[in-house]
Image (cartoon, rainbow, N blue to C red):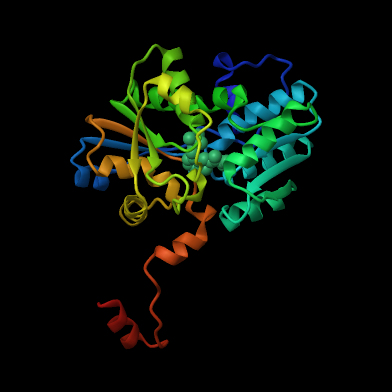
């Protein structure tokens, strides 16, 4: 039987025997070698933590299983989040699983369509806020503070407790820490969670957090966050923050797909962009790939090589294919 994240890591999570486990089979994601990209980048060992294989297609599920389980334990009647899309889908899924209503605030016009469709399918009430992510998050925090809804953004400490398990899996699987962890930096919740995991393990492994050069306008809508709510925690963690611009993000994203067979969403390639630029030191690197490419098919459709039209004829097809 599938082991839930809470069961697997029970000993290091704030749960008791009486905590109800709300699970969709999250965590225990693949750690995949990336030999071609490693060669290209002159890195001895490059590992990709493929978080797209979580139940809703992103790493958010690691934190959401715990946040929703604790919300149920504490008698919550509803959950709320603001989201650029992935937290929304994850909150909707786990709330549905728990039989709780979910209220999701999205920045209008700035969420990939498939994420919205996923969230709506999962039964959440979706309100498109006439503003950016930061203003939606402020509103969600305020409403959460009134007690009617439990906030399940990463300001909720259970989200970070759950997300720290990615580091535990990686260290366990490699038989020790890598030389560095590299991951995208949007709001900074995941960086905080990784940092928490390392300090609990007594490890000083460097974290490199990669933000969009133009936070407010990047094509990577998942990390289009002007004012990261965990900025102070990220600073305090000692993580090194570097930038990647949209051209670098897109180049890394296309290469990950065509050279390693992994189709992620554009924001998820941020870590790889920094690595391929030679910006991360070490012989053995772990790059976290945070979300699935099918989350944002419109961007793929726009930027992937276009199909070529051809007659249903073998010679014409061979000619068009160049072989
Ligand atoms: C695929 O869903 O903020 O630095 O509201 O979806 O922990 O915020 C998503 C963020 C990276 C950034 N990769 O992580 C949301 C949201 C993907 C993401 C990030 C997000 P944090």
Residue at the top extreme, as displayed: 202
Residue 161 point in image, percent of width and height: 56, 22
Q: Quadrant of residue 206?
A: top left
Q: Quick one: 65 or 191, which is closer to the camera?
A: 191
Q: Considering depth in this image, is 312 or 101 the residue closer to the camera? A: 101
Q: Is residue 141 visible?
A: yes
Q: Is residue 169 left or right of residue 152?
A: left
Residue at 56% from the left image edge and 32% from the top image edge: 62
Residue 19 is left or right of residue 222, and the answer is right
User: Between residues 104 and 28, which one lies in front from this camera angle?
Assistant: 104
Q: Quadrant of residue 149?
A: top right
In the image, residue 24 above or below residue 132: above
Q: Residue at x 21, y 37 (%)?
A: 43
Split into 4 quadrants, where in the image is the C terminus?
A: bottom left
Residue 244's x, y, as percent?
Answer: 34, 44
Q: Position of 18 compared to 223: left or right?
A: right
Residue 14 x %, y %: 62, 15
Residue located at (44% from left, 46% from top): 267
How many numbered marks are there? 0
Where is the N terminus found, in terms of image quarters?
Answer: top right
Q: Is residue 3 visible?
A: no
x then y, percent, for residue 104 = 69, 43
Residue drawn at the location 60% of the way across and 52% of the way down = 115
């Amino acid at each position: 039987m599938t082991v839930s994240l809470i069961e697997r890591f029970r000993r290091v999570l704030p749960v008791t025997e009486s905590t109800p486990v709300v699970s969709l089979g999250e965590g225990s994601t693949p750690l995949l070698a990336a030999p071609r990209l490693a060669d290209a980048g002159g890195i001895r060992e490059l590992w990709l933590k493929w978080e797209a294989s979580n139940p809703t297609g992103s790493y958010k599920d690691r934190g959401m299983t715990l946040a929703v389980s604790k919300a149920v334990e504490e008698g919550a009647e509803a959950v709320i989040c603001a989201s650029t899309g992935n937290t929304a889908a994850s909150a909707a899924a786990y709330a549905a699983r728990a039989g709780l209503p979910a209220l999701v605030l999205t920045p209008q016009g700035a969420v990939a369509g498939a994420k919205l469709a996923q969230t709506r399918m999962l039964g959440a009430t979706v309100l498109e806020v006439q503003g950016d992510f930061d203003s939606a998050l402020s509103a969600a925090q305020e409403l959460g503070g009134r007690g009617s809804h439990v906030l399940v953004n990463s300001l909720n400490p259970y989200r970070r407790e759950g997300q720290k398990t990615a580091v535990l899996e990686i260290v366990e699987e490699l038989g020790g820490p890598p030389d560095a962890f590299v991951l995208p930096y949007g709001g900074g919740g995941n960086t905080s969670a990784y940092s928490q995991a390392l300090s609990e393990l007594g490890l000083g492994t460097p974290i490199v957090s990669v933000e969009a050069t133009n936070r407010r306008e990047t094509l990577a809508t998942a990390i289009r966050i002007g004012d990261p709510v965990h900025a102070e925690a990220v600073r305090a963690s000692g993580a090194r923050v570097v930038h990647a611009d949209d051209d670098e993000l897109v180049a890394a994203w296309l290469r990950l797909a065509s050279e390693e067979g992994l189709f992620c969403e554009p924001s998820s390639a941020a870590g790889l962009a920094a690595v391929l630029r030679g910006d991360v030191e070490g012989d053995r690197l772990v790059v976290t790939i945070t979300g699935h490419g099918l989350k944002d098919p419109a961007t793929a459709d726009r930027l992937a090589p276009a199909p070529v039209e051809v007659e249903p004829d073998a010679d014409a097809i061979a000619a068009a294919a160049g072989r």
